[in-house]
C-alpha cells in the first residue's frame, strides 16, 4: 500500500514537473511589461516592425509606438540591425510575442528631462503649435505644453504667435496628470534681471499710467516709476506729464527678482526739485551724464 502511494505521488510529481517545464517553454518569463530591453529590427511590415530582443520571444513595434511624432517611414526611425532600447508595453500574446514601444520610452525620458530642467530653473526654447482663448499650446521636446495668456508677453494677437519660437520657464510640471504649464513672461523677466543692476540707466516706453506711478516697458519686462520717484517736487497728476508710448529714461534704484519688481527713478536725475516737471526734455537729453552723478550718490 505504501509503495503504491509513493508511486502515485512520484507520478503526480513527475507530471507536474513536466507540465511546469512545458509552461516555461510556452511562456518566456524573462520579458515583462514595463521592462526596458535591447533589440534590433530585422523586418518591417505595413503596421510596424519585428524586433529581435533575444530569447525565444519575438517582439513587435507598432508604427504608432515608433516615435513621439507621426511616422511614415519606419526605416528613418529604426534602421535595420541597429541595436537600441525598447519598452515592453504588452506581455506575450498567445503566439509568444511581446509588444514594444519607443514612443513611451521617449515620453518617460522627456518627463525626467523636463523635471530636471524645472529644478535647475533653466530657460528653454519652445515652438508655438496652436492658440485658443486662454493661451497658446507649444511643443516642448515632443510633448504638448500650455502657456496661459497671462504668462505671454504678446497677449492680444495670439494667432500671430503660431510657428514662433519662445523662451519660457516652467510654471508646473505634473507627470501624473500629464500637465505642462509654462511662462514666457517669467523667462523674459528672469533674463532681464540678469542684465540689470542698481544704478543702471535704462530706456523704455510708458506702457500705462496709474494714480500711484508709471509702468515702463523695458523690452518685454515692466519697471515701475513710482509717483514719489518722478521728481523731488510734489506731483498730483501723472497724466499731465506722461502719455502711453512715450520714450523714457530712468535709473534702476531697486531690484526684487522674487517679486518680479524693477523700481525706477527720474527724481535722482534732476539738477533741482521740479526739473522733471519744468524741463523733462532737458533731463532726458542729458540723462547719461546725470546718471553718472546719481550712481555715485546711490553707492
Image (tube, rainbow, N blue to C red):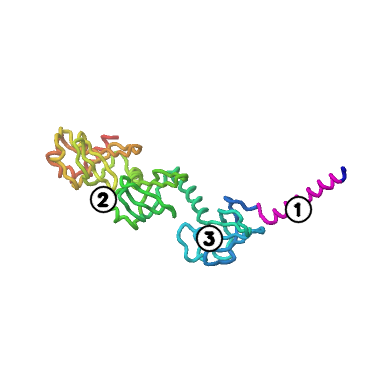
Residue 254 is one of the magenta-drawn residues:
no
User: Which numbered circle lies on residue 145?
Assistant: none
Instruction: Name the residue that disc number 1 marks.
Output: 18
Viewer-proximal residue among 250 and 45: 45
Question: Residue, x 41% and y 47% (percent of image)?
Answer: 180
Q: Is residue 2 above or below residue 33?
A: above
Instruction: Name the residue that disc number 2 marks.
Output: 156
Viewer-proximal residue among 32 and 102: 32
Judged by depth in the image, the label closer to the viewer, 3 or 1, is: 1
Which region is colored magenta?
A: 4-29
Q: Sequence order check: which comes first, mark 3 or mark 1? A: 1
Question: Residue, x 41% and y 43% (percent of image)?
Answer: 172
Question: SS for tag 2?
Answer: loop
Whether residue 293 is visible, yes or no, is no
User: Which numbered circle lies on residue 62?
Assistant: 3
Q: Are marks 3 and 1 in contact (CB under 8 Å)?
A: no
- Where, quadrant-wise, is the C terminus in this rendering? top left
Number of dots carrying numbers: 3
Judged by depth in the image, the label closer to the viewer, 3 or 2, is: 3
Picture coordinates of residue 37, whole percent (x, y): 60, 54
Q: Sequence order check: which comes first, mark 3 or mark 2? A: 3
- The alpha-carbon separation of the residues under discs 2 and 1 comes to 74 Å
Is the residue marked by circle 2 packed among few (<14), some (14-19), or many (20+) residues within 10 Å? Answer: few
Picture coordinates of residue 296, whole percent (x, y): 27, 36
- Where, quadrant-wise, is the N terminus in this rendering? top right
Viewer-proximal residue among 69 and 290: 69
Amino acid at each position: 500500500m505504501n509503495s503504491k502511494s509513493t508511486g502515485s505521488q512520484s507520478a503526480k510529481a513527475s507530471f507536474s514537473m513536466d507540465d511546469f517545464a512545458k509552461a516555461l517553454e510556452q511562456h518566456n518569463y524573462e520579458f515583462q511589461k514595463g521592462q526596458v530591453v535591447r533589440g534590433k529590427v530585422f523586418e518591417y511590415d505595413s503596421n510596424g516592425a519585428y524586433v529581435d530582443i533575444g530569447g525565444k520571444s519575438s517582439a513587435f513595434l507598432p508604427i504608432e509606438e515608433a516615435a513621439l511624432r507621426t511616422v511614415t517611414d519606419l526605416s528613418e526611425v529604426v534602421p535595420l540591425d541597429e541595436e537600441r532600447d525598447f519598452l515592453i508595453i504588452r506581455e506575450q500574446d498567445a503566439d509568444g510575442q511581446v509588444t514594444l514601444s519607443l514612443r513611451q520610452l521617449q515620453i518617460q525620458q522627456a518627463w525626467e528631462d523636463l523635471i530636471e530642467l524645472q529644478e535647475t530653473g533653466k530657460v528653454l526654447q519652445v515652438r508655438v503649435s496652436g492658440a485658443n482663448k486662454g493661451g497658446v499650446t507649444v511643443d516642448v521636446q515632443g510633448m504638448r505644453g500650455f502657456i496661459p495668456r497671462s504668462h505671454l508677453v504678446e497677449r492680444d494677437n495670439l494667432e500671430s504667435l503660431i510657428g514662433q519660437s519662445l523662451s519660457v520657464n516652467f510654471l508646473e510640471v505634473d507627470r501624473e496628470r500629464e500637465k505642462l504649464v509654462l511662462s514666457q513672461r517669467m523667462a523674459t523677466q528672469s533674463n532681464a534681471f540678469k542684465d540689470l543692476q542698481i544704478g543702471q540707466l535704462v530706456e523704455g516706453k510708458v506702457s500705462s499710467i496709474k494714480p500711484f506711478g508709471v509702468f515702463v516697458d523695458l523690452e518685454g519686462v515692466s519697471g515701475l516709476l513710482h509717483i514719489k520717484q518722478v521728481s523731488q517736487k510734489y506731483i498730483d497728476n501723472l497724466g499731465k506729464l506722461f502719455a502711453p508710448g512715450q520714450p523714457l529714461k530712468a535709473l534702476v534704484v531697486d531690484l526684487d527678482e522674487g517679486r518680479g519688481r524693477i523700481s525706477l527713478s527720474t527724481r535722482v536725475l534732476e539738477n533741482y526739485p521740479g526739473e522733471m516737471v519744468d524741463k523733462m526734455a532737458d533731463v532726458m537729453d542729458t540723462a547719461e551724464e546725470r546718471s553718472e552723478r546719481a550712481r555715485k550718490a546711490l553707492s
